[in-house]
Amino acid sequence: MKRIINAKVGISLKFIFLIAVFSVLSSCEKMSDVDNQGGDSGGSNGPVANEVLIQGMAFTPSTITIVANTTVTWTNKDAVPHTVTSDNGLFESGTITTNGTFSYTFTAAGTYSYHCAVHPSMTAKLTVN
Ligand SMILES: [Cu+2]
């Protein structure tokens, strides 16, 4: 009879131990899940893309704010060619024909003014935080 009771106590202690181990393991898994999610958003998605349309002889939106390592893509929706030309020479698309695109990845914080070399009145600005 004593032996049976001891066995029962032993089993319930093992059971409690297993629950404790399981709860520690599952909390670790939750933590690593959060870590994985953070890693995935940076890794698989890559740089965040931002679109600027060149339409109606204007850059739309004419001002955008992005974070560093964002790739911006300009698309010419006009019938006439345009360029995306950095005021300080950092980037230069060359001629973008209708439905053509130009992409540039901004890695450093700052304010970047640009214009269309064909139509100097077309100006826009981009802020990288
Ligand atoms: Cu233009």
Image: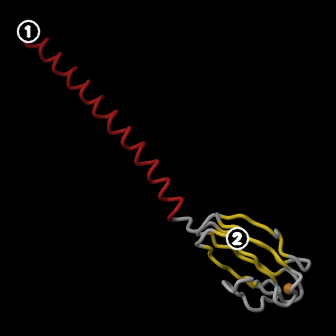
The answer to which quarter of the image holds residue 67 is: bottom right
In the rendered image of this protein, does residue 21 appear above or below residue 29?
above
**Percent coordinates x, y for residue 122 in the rendering:** 86, 80
- Residue closer to the observer: 10 or 71: 71
Horizontal relation, residue 95 to residue 129: left or right:
right
Disc assigned to residue 101: none
Which callout, 2 or 1, points to the residue nearer the camera? Answer: 2
* Residue, disc 1: 2
- Amino acid type of the residue tagged 1 in the rendering: Lys
**Percent coordinates x, y for residue 21 in the rendering:** 28, 34
**Percent coordinates x, y for residue 52 in the rendering:** 77, 72
The answer to which quarter of the image holds residue 73 is: bottom right
Horizontal relation, residue 89 to residue 35: left or right:
right
**Percent coordinates x, y for residue 98 in the rendering:** 83, 86
Horizontal relation, residue 99 to residue 56: left or right:
left
Residue at x 46% of width, y 48% of height: 34
Horizontal relation, residue 23 to residue 46: left or right:
left
Residue at x 67% of width, y 79% of height: 103
* Residue, disc 2: 111
- Residue closer to the observer: 38 or 7: 38
